[in-house]
Image (cartoon, helix red, strand yellow):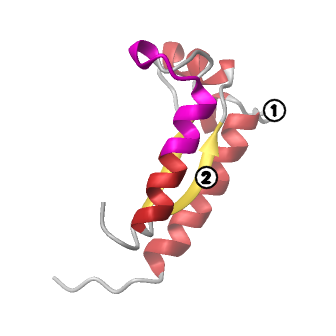
Amino acid sequence: MNKGDAVMIMSMASGGGDTGKTTVALTEEIEAFCMEKGTEIVGKIMYDNTITKAMIAGVPVVAFAVEPKSKAAEEITQMWNRLSGFCNSRVYLA
């Protein structure tokens, strides 16, 4: 990761797999790492069953959860808006 990069964190329902760490501990570890590296966290997606349902249906979460919007769909939309602004504020030379 480079200074100025952006990252998103997705919190899962269960713990950290084989690490023995809780999801909260892993999230805090990622946040501390990003802060140390000067990397902006654009958002977090908390566990939402809609994500699994959308994956099974083969559609994006934001398209699957039209009304009412799931929390995950709202978080993804907010992150997309932040990232769009982040990308549009930079000039890329080819």
Q: Quick one: quadrant of the N terminus?
A: bottom left
Label 2 to label 1, Cα distance in Å? 22 Å
**Main secondary structure type of the part rendered in magenta:** helix
Range of magenta residues: 17-29
- Vertical comparison of 85 with 49: above or below: below
User: Is residue 28 a member of the stretch shown in magenta?
Assistant: yes
Closer to us: 49 or 8 = 8
Q: Position of residue 76 (x, y in %)?
A: 61, 46
Closer to us: 72 or 64 = 72
Q: Position of residue 69 (x, y in %)?
A: 78, 36
In the picture of the structure, the residue carrying the numbered disc 1 is 67
Q: Amino acid at mark 1?
A: Glu
In the picture of the structure, the residue carrying the numbered disc 2 is 43
Circles 2 and 1: CB distance less than 8 Å? no
> Of helix, strand and loop, which one carries label 1?
loop
- 29 vs 50, left or right, is left
Q: Position of residue 70 (x, y in %)?
A: 75, 32
